[in-house]
């Protein structure tokens, strides 16, 4: 029986290979955090993360991604998802929440490939539809998440640079002595 890796866990299925990933997740595996909206790849409610890339599960046969790690909103957050979720809470982005699983995973995927997107890049990349019209909150929250991730990365670099400088300084001091 084929085995998929979903949220870090092996999950076996004997579903028809042509079954959309969305049906497999929701109906076969009980992962209902991924939502159905349009069923034709237009709204983004069904967005999941496949190996770091946002994909629309309603038009993706599960067998087409069976060999790649899949993350749904129920999965443990990586740095990008955690930063988006924190910014979403701080910016009170979600309203009814229906579109937000997809919106969050699409936003995290954008930040992985573009750490500092402009408003235009956000609009081009995040084509998820929101009936509650949260777009005006999504953009500033995405900038806040980008800043938070950048800050963390900068801090890590600072530590690495300080260590490198410390080593150089120690060598220089040692040389002088
Ligand atoms: S339900 Fe998949 S894009 Fe709308
Ligand atoms: S928050 Fe209601 S549909 Fe987006």
Image: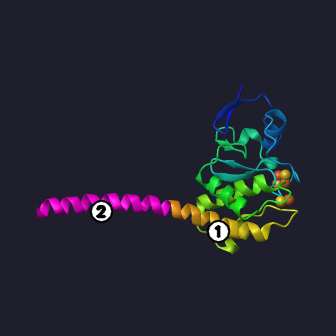
> At 82% across and 42% down in the image, what residue appears?
32
> At 71% across and 57% down in the image, what residue appears?
106
Question: What whole-number distance in Å separates the C-alpha atoms at marks 1 and 2?
Answer: 31 Å
Q: Which residues are magenta?
A: 153-177
Give percent across and percent down for residue 150.
54, 64
Q: Is residue 19 visible?
A: no
Which residue sits furthest top?
1
Give percent across and percent down for residue 160.
38, 58
Look at the picture and state if 49 lies above or below 164.
Answer: above
Q: Identify the residue under disc 2.
A: 165
> At 79% across and 46% down in the image, what residue appears?
34
Q: Identify the residue under disc 1.
A: 143
Q: Is residue 151 magenta?
A: no
Give percent across and percent down for residue 19.
82, 38
* Rendered image quadrant of residue 128: bottom right
In the foreground, 176 or 9: 176
- Callout 1: 10 Å neighbours few (<14), some, many (20+)? many
* Rendered image quadrant of residue 108: bottom right
């Amino acid at each position: 029986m084929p085995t998929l890796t979903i949220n870090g866990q092996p999950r076996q299925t004997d579903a028809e290979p042509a079954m959309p990933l969305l049906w497999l997740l929701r109906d076969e595996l009980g992962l209902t955090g991924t939502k159905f909206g349009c069923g034709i790849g237009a709204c983004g409610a069904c967005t999941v993360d496949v190996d770091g890339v946002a994909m629309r599960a309603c038009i993706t046969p599960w067998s087409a991604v069976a060999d790649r790690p899949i993350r749904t909103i129920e999965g443990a957050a990586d740095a990008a998802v955690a930063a988006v979720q924190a910014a979403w809470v701080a910016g009170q982005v979600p309203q009814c929440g229906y579109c937000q699983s997809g919106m969050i995973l699409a936003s995290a995927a954008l930040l992985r490939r573009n750490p500092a997107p402009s408003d235009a890049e956000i609009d081009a990349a995040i084509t998820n539809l929101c009936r509650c019209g949260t777009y005006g909150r999504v953009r500033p929250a995405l900038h806040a998440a980008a800043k938070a991730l950048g800050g963390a990365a900068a801090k890590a670099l600072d530590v690495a640079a300080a260590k490198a400088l410390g080593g150089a300084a120690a060598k220089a001091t040692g040389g002088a002595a």
